[in-house]
Amino acid sequence: MMRDREMDVLLKSLDAAGPPRACTERSRQDLERILSGDAAGTDPRREQSRRQPNLMRRNRQLILVGAAAAVAVGIIAVPVALGGDPAFASWTQTPSPLNPEASERAGNDCRSSDRNTAEESSESSEAKVAIAERRGEWTTVVLSGPGSFSAMCVTDGSLFGGSFGYSGRRPGDVEPAPRELLPTAMGMGATPAGELSMVVGAAGSDVSGVSYSSRTEGEVQASVANGYFVLWFPGNELRDYPEEGVLLQVRYSDGTQEEVAVSLDWANS
């Protein structure tokens, strides 16, 4: 049984009347100590009995329909036990960029959440933040590293970290042409908040904006920065996209725009 003092710490961290973001980091640290049996005053004689599997930390596989294995690898999904943003209630069509300080924190969280191979973990630790955006309670980070390595993390910032992501590299270190988009992962996946559709990848130097006309969510704006783009929205609309690809509206730095079909075929050619 959890001691009374430890339970009091956890309950205070869940106080809805308190500032929701000010207590997030402390709550997470308190919870880590409690779950790991390292809270102050833990009786070492009881430590062995507390060493039971933490089901709330187990990863589940997130499937991106149509994603090539050579492109999108290491897909993870972490279930939300408490808190979070059920049914993507706070999600917004247009993202807001994070300020530099928040961006760096989000990047560090994304790097530390990479639980794939040792090689991928090492690459993530050296990768820089290419995109850091917010859609309501949801934060999205795209990391960029040497050799066309990239990783993406999406989280709602809940106590138990409702999130998903991927890491991998573009085959052959291919770079996009100035007006080209090279998606590295696209399709749909399932999270505790529900199903979602997404497209993420590399963007050419002349690409200034990307959007998608969703049947259910309307015009979804992507974030475009530092040679990458990312957009996602609730629902499974991209579960079975056409063979010719997903139609995106692409804007260029000279003010022109056009509709472009993107797919993962380029990675298999």
Image: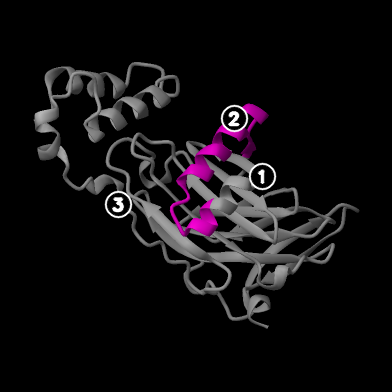
> Considering only vertical position in the picture, is 244 above or below 234?
below
Q: Is mark 2 on a helix, strand or loop?
A: helix
> Is residue 218 at least partly visible in the picture?
no
- Image check: 76 left or right of 38? right
Q: Which of 198 and 46 is in front in this view?
A: 46
Q: What element carries label 3?
A: loop
- Image check: 256 left or right of 246? right
Task: Give the spatial CA distance, label 1 vs label 3.
Answer: 27 Å
Q: Which of 172 and 184 is in front in this view?
A: 172
Q: Which of 29 and 38 is in front in this view?
A: 38
Task: Give the spatial CA distance, label 1 vs label 2.
Answer: 14 Å
Pointers 3 and 2 in contact (CB under 8 A)? no
Image quarter where the N terminus lies is top left
Task: Give the spatial CA distance, label 3 vs label 2.
Answer: 27 Å
> Considering only vertical position in the picture, is 143 above or below 242?
above
Q: Name the residue under label 1.
A: 128
Q: Which numbered tag is attached to residue 58?
A: 3
**Quadrant housing residue 68:** bottom right
Task: Give the amino acid type for the residue marked by disc 2 in the picture.
Answer: Ala
Mark 3 vs 2, N-terminal side: 3
Please provide percent x and percent y for residue 269: 68, 83
Task: Give the amino acid type for the residue marked by disc 3 in the picture.
Answer: Arg
Q: Name the residue under label 2.
A: 102
Residue for point 70% across, 61% down: 147
Residue for point 24% across, 34% down: 35
Q: Which SS type dominates the magenta stretch?
A: helix
